[in-house]
Amino acid sequence: MLKIDNENNITITKGDTLTLTLNLKKDGDDYVPVEGDTIRFAVSKGYVGETAYQLLIEESVPIDSLTFTVSSEKMELLSHASAYNYDVELTHGDGSVDTVISAQIKVLGEVK
């Protein structure tokens, strides 16, 4: 089961594959990444320092499709009945960074 609410919070069943296609906007218009841009999806939990989280999953998003997949094996690493933070960052060719999504992932247990 995959559910995304209006604030980009994700609810997913433990061990399911996560596949999402991003729709990026800039100044109200669709943004199409250009060569030199990189897009990163990251899942983390808990603080490592004052502002950093413990990185658990990291995936690059292909700029030609804006679709990324996190394998069921990686998603299996997340504990059920837990909430994690995730974000999507767009790094432009000039080095500037935009965090385009910052929300939570809630992991549900599966029926056995």
Image (cartoon, helix red, strand yellow):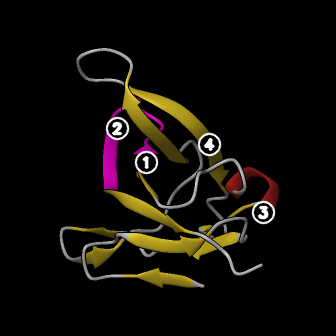
Three-letter residue code for mark 3: Ser
Residue on which disc 4 sits: 57
Q: Residue furthest front?
A: 112
Three-letter residue code for mark 4: Ile
Spatial CA span between label 1 and label 4: 17 Å
Image check: 73 left or right of 20? Answer: right
Residues at circles 2 and 1 in contact by the CB criterion of under 8 Å: yes
First along the sequence among labels 3 and 2 = 3
* Image quarter (top left, top right, bottom left or bottom right) of the C terminus: bottom right
Task: Say whether residue 97 is magenta.
Answer: yes
Residue on which disc 3 sits: 72
Residue on which disc 2 sits: 97
Spatial CA span between label 3 and label 2: 29 Å
Three-letter residue code for mark 1: Leu
* Image quarter (top left, top right, bottom left or bottom right) of the N terminus: bottom right
Residues at circles 3 and 2 in contact by the CB criterion of under 8 Å: no
Q: Position of residue 88 (x, y in %)?
A: 43, 52
Q: Which residues are magenta?
A: 87-102
